[in-house]
Image (cartoon, grey):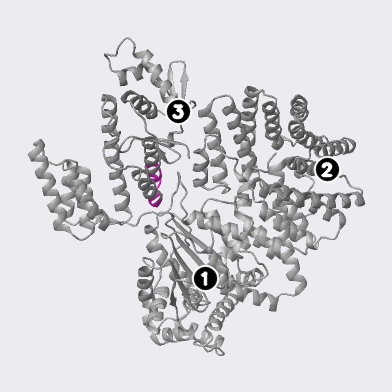
């Protein structure tokens, strides 16, 4: 835990959680004065002036030396450093509560300025929670200490009042009114809290008390200072007298649009025409105050998700740590329900972890999730759950968390849950919804037809919305026209008993209507084609490949399906099915699409993604990715830079994995697994890359392709630290390469990396030598550069550091003028820095690490860049440049947090260590 110094209340020094007794007024004063500027040099003259006073004795300088010596004896010799002109307390500034308070307050104000109400609230609470009661700096009586104490107290009041503004914006006026009374009484001349109290009382419906608060403040100002209240307070009183609307609470923004920290705000949009369910809404709002788990169950299409999202939007302000939404796909057409591990990955990503930072074992991942939620106040929506076994490990541990689950299954065996069964709308409520959707005038003009539509839709909200969309799309139709069509389509269905079938019938009617419209025929055909794919979302580019159309035609058809409510928006230029509509589309595809045409359409999508993934790989890895030679039958997207490539991979990550699962038996699946290796590895998504590669391997029979896939799999295993498995599959790959007669340089190179990580250095060097010889024989200087770069790391581990430096310098010169090696330039500079560091040439290492960082930034390799910052930090630490070292480590952790490979809380804990432990995400990097 280390050292802590506390100003905000009685003066305290803490070591490993225990108070340390420090005697002597001047010792306490010197340490406190150094702590005020922790990490920075305080001039000796300033210490003498502040602690001994201007009238200090002639021996004051000698006394200062003695005090410093005694402090080092009592505390730690390393804690206070001697600088040329003074002394420096070598303590992280966050270990001094007053400095941490200032930083948290600054972050809170920044986040608030960017609209992050919930995040600002959490930060302000954390900052104010550091105050322990009593005046700051306790019994220290020196003038500097009293000045600092007064400043801190004034800052506390300002932060408290800033926090009150945030709480008022979030609708917390009832609690604010109760708390502010004491504050205003204690500080009767502060006009800002008086104004806040007046506003809180006004919003709580207590106008007379708000005006009385104004009069008390005015009386105090006149009696004590002889002045009237300021213009702001006077304007507020006048606005209350005339009840100006500007004083009413406006809905706060619940999402941070910039700044930090990132608070999840993952709810889908609320439904504008949300109707009825008033009793259910009231029950759920009440339930969210009490039980930790609430389950909404009912048949498909009944509005479970809409109700959960609507209530969650209303309650979001009560959960300062955010709202997380997970679609568990328990009843999603064409998609398997999320496994426990997949759902835990989503949840942990929302809490700031991703890739290799997520434990591979479901039990360990669940434990990590429970740990992160222990002190959290988060609302978690688990939508579309399959059964109890799917959701049980997803329930958070924190008493401040609430979990809202929707499912067709009643989940009656879920412990300590409150249940709400959702049924069809009553006729009156369904008629109200229909009228809101089609317009009250249209509904009133034909009440019998509207009532017939309501009955035929069986009170199912999804069916009503689709039916209304048909009327909206066809203004020439009357409600009677639609009622006739609905009657024909649903003649077979018993709505009360087979609600799902009623929804299908409504979808079928909507699909038929599209076929009838000249402008809707593309959309009608596309609905069926989309049923061929198991993708979570659909983009215009992939849809164009699916249909064999130009992109503009595909986009127009997608938009037409959106307006018909047969698709839902899923982000910019991205669409998804409601699960029941997706089921209908899948059934239509199975019935209407000939098998050969269906297979060809899916193959076009696979090749669209394959072409784009190959282009992404080349943008990120340069010549290392040029071995991806599988012929593509679709053009794919144009990607101009590594940044565009990484952004594409980020947005298409789930689709790529779903496509890998669906097309594992296709001969191009191996190419897809090979291509996504580069963007996935750059972001630390090793587990997902392994899944795609293992799927491709199962169906891969051609020896050369199988050898290549095995090599990729071995590389991924090594990146996750599964070294024994890596060696096994790489040797299997090597044997296949020998049968095909192809170059095995890459496999020997990967074996060398794995052996090096295992400490089998002689075997690593032998593998490097073999790989290098093959690259020379093949005339591949680019591949030779990769091999020799890795050889440097082996030499360093063998202690042959002079040879390592020479080899690394050679590689830098070797690739300088090579085409397509720009993506490698940062890597070989980083390796040269590693060699310098191992050889004790620390200043040279710092220079090379910084060059490597500059070169790597353009290629979006989060893991590699974080690793470079990590070793730069250690090099600076070895040089005694502690402040710069900690900044470099902080940069490393920021990158890993941004990539969701490290949680912010874990980064904070690591930075609190004198020398941080190596983060899990980069432990397997050379």
Mark nearest the camera among 1 and 3 is: 3
User: For the point 11% across and 48% down, which residue is it?
Assistant: 216
Please check the rendered image and state whether residue 117 is part of the magenta-colored stretch, yes or no.
yes
Residue 88 position within the rendered picture, expressed as x and y whole percent measured from the top left: 44, 24
Q: Tag 2 or tag 1, which sits nearer the N-term? A: 1
Determine which residue is flagged by label 3.
Answer: 39
718, 427: nearer the viewer: 718
Q: Residues within 10 Å of mark 3 (few under 14, many from 20)?
A: some
Q: Tag 2 or tag 3, which sits nearer the N-term? A: 3
Q: Is residue 420 above or below residue 745?
A: below
Please check the rendered image and state whether residue 828 is part of the magenta-colored stretch, yes or no.
no
Is label 1 in contact with label 2 (beta carbons under 8 Å)? Answer: no
Quote the CA–CA distance across marks 1 and 3.
Answer: 60 Å
532, 156: nearer the viewer: 156
Q: State the residue lying farthest toward the top.
A: 58
Q: Secondary structure at mark 1?
A: loop
Determine which residue is flagged by label 2.
Answer: 748
Quote the CA–CA distance across marks 3 and 2.
Answer: 48 Å
Q: Residues within 10 Å of mark 1 (few under 14, many from 20)?
A: many
Residue 140 position within the rendered picture, expressed as x and y whole percent measured from the top left: 28, 29
Mark nearest the camera among 1 and 2 is: 2
Mark nearest the camera among 3 and 2 is: 3
- What is the span of residues highlighted in magenta in the rendered image? 109-118
Determine which residue is flagged by label 1.
Answer: 565
Q: Quadrant of the C terminus?
A: top right
912, 750: nearer the viewer: 912
Q: Secondary structure at mark 3?
A: loop
Q: Secondary structure at mark 2?
A: helix
């Amino acid at each position: 835990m280390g050292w802590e110094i506390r100003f905000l209340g009685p003066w305290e020094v803490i070591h490993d959680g225990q108070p340390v007794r420090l005697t002597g007024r001047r010792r306490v004063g010197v340490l406190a004065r150094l702590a005020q500027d922790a990490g920075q040099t305080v001039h000796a003259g300033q210490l003498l002036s502040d602690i001994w006073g201007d009238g200090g004795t002639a021996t004051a300088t000698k006394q200062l030396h003695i005090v410093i010596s005694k402090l080092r004896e009592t505390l730690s010799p390393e804690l206070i450093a001697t600088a040329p002109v003074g002394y420096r307390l070598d303590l992280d500034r966050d270990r001094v509560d007053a400095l941490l308070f200032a930083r948290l307050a600054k972050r809170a104000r920044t986040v608030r300025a960017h609209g992050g109400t919930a995040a600002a609230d959490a930060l302000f609470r954390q900052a104010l929670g550091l105050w322990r009661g009593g005046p700051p700096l306790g019994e220290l009586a020196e003038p500097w200490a009293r000045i600092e104490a007064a400043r801190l107290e004034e800052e506390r009041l300002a932060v408290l009042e800033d926090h009150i503004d945030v709480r008022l914006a979030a609708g917390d006026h009832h609690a604010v009114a109760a708390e502010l009374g004491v504050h205003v009484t204690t500080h009767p001349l502060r006009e800002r809290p008086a104004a806040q109290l007046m506003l809180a009382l006004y919003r709580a419906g207590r106008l007379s008390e708000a005006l009385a608060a104004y009069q008390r403040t005015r009386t105090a100002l006149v009696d004590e200072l002889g002045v009237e209240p300021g213009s702001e307070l006077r304007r507020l009183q006048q606005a209350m007298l005339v009840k100006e609307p500007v004083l009413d609470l406006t809905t706060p923004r619940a999402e941070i649009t910039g700044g930090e920290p990132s608070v999840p705000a993952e709810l889908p949009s609320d439904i504008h025409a949300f109707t009825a369910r008033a009793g259910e809404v009231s029950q759920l709002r009440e339930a969210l105050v009490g039980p930790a788990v609430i389950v909404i169950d009912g048949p498909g299409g009944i509005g479970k998700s809409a109700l959960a999202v609507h209530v969650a939007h209303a309650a979001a302000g009560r959960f300062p740590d955010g709202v997380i939404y997970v679609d568990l796909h328990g009843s999603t057409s064409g998609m398997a329900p999320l496994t426990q591990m997949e759902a835990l990955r989503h949840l942990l990503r929302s809490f700031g972890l991703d890739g290799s930072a997520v434990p591979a074992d479901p039990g360990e991942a669940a434990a990590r999730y429970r740990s992160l939620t222990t002190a959290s106040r988060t609302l978690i929506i688990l939508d579309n759950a399959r059964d109890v076994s799917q959701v049980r490990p997803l329930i958070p541990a924190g008493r401040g968390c609430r979990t809202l689950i929707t499912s067709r299954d009643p989940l009656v065996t879920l412990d300590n849950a409150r249940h709400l069964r959702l049924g069809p709308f009553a006729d009156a409520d369904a008629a109200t919804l229909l009228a809101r959707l089609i317009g009250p005038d249209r509904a009133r003009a034909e009440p019998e037809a509207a009532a017939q539509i309501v009955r035929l839709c069986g009170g199912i909200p999804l069916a009503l919305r689709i039916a209304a969309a048909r009327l909206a799309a066809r203004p020439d139709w009357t409600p009677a026209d639609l009622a006739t069509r609905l009657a024909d389509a649903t003649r077979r269905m018993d709505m009360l008993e087979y609600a799902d079938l009623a929804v299908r019938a409504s979808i079928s009617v909507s699909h038929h209507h599209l076929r009838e419209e000249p402008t809707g025929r593309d959309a009608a055909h596309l609905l069926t084609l989309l049923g061929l794919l198991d993708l979570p979302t659909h983009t215009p580019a992939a849809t164009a490949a699916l249909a064999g159309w130009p992109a503009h035609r595909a986009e127009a058809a997608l938009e037409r399906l959106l307006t018909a409510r047969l698709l839902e928006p899923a982000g910019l230029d991205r669409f998804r099915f409601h699960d029941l509509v997706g089921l209908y589309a899948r059934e239509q595809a199975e019935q209407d699409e000939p098998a050969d045409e269906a297979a060809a359409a899916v193959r076009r999508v696979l090749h669209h993604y394959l072409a784009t993934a190959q282009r992404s790989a080349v943008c990120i890895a340069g010549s290392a990715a040029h071995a991806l030679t599988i012929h593509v039958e679709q053009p794919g997207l144009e990607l101009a830079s590594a940044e565009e490539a990484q952004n594409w991979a980020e947005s298409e990550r789930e689709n790529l994995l779903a496509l890998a699962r669906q097309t594992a038996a296709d001969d191009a699946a191996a190419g897809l697994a090979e291509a996504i290796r580069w963007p996935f590895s750059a972001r630390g998504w090793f587990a997902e890359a392994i899944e795609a590669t293992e799927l491709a391997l199962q169906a891969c029979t051609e020896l050369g392709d199988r050898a290549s896939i095995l090599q990729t799999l071995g590389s991924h295993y090594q990146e996750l630290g599964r070294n024994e498995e890596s060696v096994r599959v790489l040797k299997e790959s090597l044997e296949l390469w020998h049968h095909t007669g192809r170059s095995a340089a890459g496999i020997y190179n990967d074996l060398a990396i794995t052996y090096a990580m295992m400490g089998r250095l002689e075997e690593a060097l032998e593998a490097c030598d073999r790989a290098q010889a093959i690259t020379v024989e093949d005339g591949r200087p680019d591949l030779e550069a990769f091999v020799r770069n890795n050889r440097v790391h082996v030499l360093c581990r063998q202690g042959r550091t002079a040879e390592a430096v020479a080899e690394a310098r050679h590689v830098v010169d070797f690739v300088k003028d090579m085409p397509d090696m720009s993506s490698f330039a940062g890597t070989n500079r980083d390796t040269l820095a590693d060699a310098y560091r191992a050889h004790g040439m620390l200043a040279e290492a710092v220079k090379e690490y910084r060059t490597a960082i500059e070169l790597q930034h353009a290629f979006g390799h989060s893991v590699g860049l974080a690793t470079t910052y990590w070793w730069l930090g250690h090099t600076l630490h070895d040089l005694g440049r502690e402040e710069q070292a900690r900044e470099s480590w902080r940069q490393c952790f920021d990158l890993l947090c941004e990539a969701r490979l490290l949680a912010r809380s874990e980064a904070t804990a690591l930075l609190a260590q004198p020398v941080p432990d190596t983060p899990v995400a980069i432990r397997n990097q050379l």
